[in-house]
Amino acid sequence: MRIPVLAANWKMFKTVGETVSYLKEFCALTAGVSGAEMVVAPPFTAIRAASEAARGSNVGIAAQDCYWEQEGAFTGEISVRMLKDAGACYVIVGHSERRRLFGDTDERVNRKLGAVLAAGLTPIVCIGETLEERDAGRTLAVLDRQVEAGLAGLTPAQVASLVIAYEPVWAIGTGRNATPAQAGEAHAHIRGKLAATFGAEAAAACRILYGGSVKPENIKDLMAIEDVDGALVGGASLTVSSFFAIVSGAQLV
Ligand code: 13P
């Protein structure tokens, strides 16, 4: 059985103080939640404080990105070893904003993924097509390429431990989420691709989240889709009440 994951990607929002007060409230509210993994990804600067605020709770802390080298002359970069030391258990890799604005390619995603796995942390790997790619009928081919190149060289056991987030780029921050049919098609395709490449067992164990305008109002319908194992939430995760409503909604299914 795949345990659902509800993950908050805060992007470039929240100071240390805002992070701590959010997590204290959120951890108290979710103390009784079982049967779902909850994850919060604050900015790098708040990871240490977040992990301290969430200690003893069932909320895990994620980083939003990483660099693949352990250390060295890489000004501005942060290694997985440093993230682990700060208390992160998960690392988001290949978010479309990193791909589009900061030059992450499938090859870079693959190197980051290797570093996260080598450190024993759980990667949350983002894939998804742009609007142009969808309109051109290339959605499934793009997903295939991102899985093939992004996950190249991984073992079936590593794939089983992965979290993948399907985030159609046109649905991020637009208020326009994928329809259940669109999400269902993409998720089933990704799982089929994983099965063909890494075997049925790895594919069946890998959690595939949906991301893109997830809100308390649409989480139930998304979670009802067979291959949707949770959500990666941006804007609607920034307030405790709305992320908690998403966690609650996801669990009702
Ligand atoms: P929104 O939920 O704000 O659309 O963002 C989705 C996202 O990018 C999560 O990583």
Image (cartoon, rainbow, N blue to C red):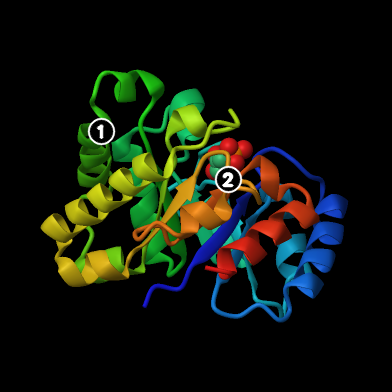
Q: Position of residue 91 (x, y in %)?
A: 51, 55
Quadrant observed for ligand 1 in the rendered image? top right
SS type, badge 1: helix
Marks 1 and 2: in contact by CB < 8 Å?
A: no
Distance from mark 2 CB to nearest ligand 1 atom below 8 Å: yes
For image coordinates 34% across by 48% down, the residue present is 184
Q: Position of residue 155 (x, y in %)?
A: 21, 65
For image coordinates 58% across by 28% down, the residue present is 174
Which residue occupies the foreground of this view, 235 or 61? 235
Circle 2: residue type: Val
Residue 35 shows up from this direction: yes
Q: Which residue is mark 1?
A: 142
Q: Which residue is mark 2?
A: 214
Q: Quadrant of residue 142?
A: top left
Front position among marks 2 and 1: 2
User: For mark 2, does the 10 Å Cα neighbourhood hold few (<14), some (14 to 19), or many (20 or more) residues?
Assistant: many
| Mark earlier in primary sequence (2, 1) | 1
